[in-house]
Amino acid sequence: MTPQPRREDERTRIRKAMDQLLAGKATASDGSLTVKALAADAGVHRMALMKRHSDLKNLFYERVRNETLQIPESERKLRETLTRQWQTIKD
């Protein structure tokens, strides 16, 4: 099991990376507002962000929506897929 201080260190890095990405100052990624970029800038594995820190992932997407008035990439792709499927059903 991972010691508690390391998890807190990860959480701190993730929060810092959120601020950097939203400010347009990416350090280790292409600067896109995605979980992949967030994980890269925070220096954590993407699956750690998805599983252990899902609350921070959700907070990131919420901040993307509220602060940039953009739809997160994952949500945009899901909407496109649903639109295509509804069109297929309609046809």
Image (cartoon, grey):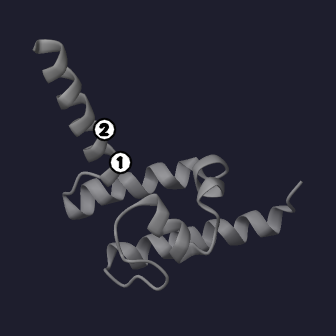
Residue in view at x 32 percent, y 79 percent: 23
Q: Which residue is mark 2?
A: 78
Vertical placement of residue 29 versus 68, above or below: below
The answer to whether mark 2 and mark 1 are in CB contact below 8 A is yes
Give the x, y percent position of residue 15.
Answer: 52, 69
Task: Tell whether 39 sits left or right of 51.
Answer: left
Q: CA distance from mark 2 to mark 1?
A: 6 Å
Residue shown at the point (64%, 64%) measured from the top left = 45
Residue at the left extreme of this rendering: 91
The foreground one among 75 and 16 is 75
Task: Name the spot of residue 79 as percent of width and height, x first.
Answer: 24, 37
Residue 74 — which label? 1
Near mark 2 (Cα within 10 A), the count class, few <14, some 14-19 or many ≥20, is: few
Identity, as a three-letter code, of the amino acid under mark 1: Ser
Q: Residue at x 31, y 53 (%)?
A: 73
Q: Quadrant of the N terminus?
A: bottom right
Secondary structure at badge 1 equals helix
Structural crowding at the residue carrying mark 1, measured as other residues with C-alpha within 10 Å and reported as few (<14), some (14–19) or many (≥20): few
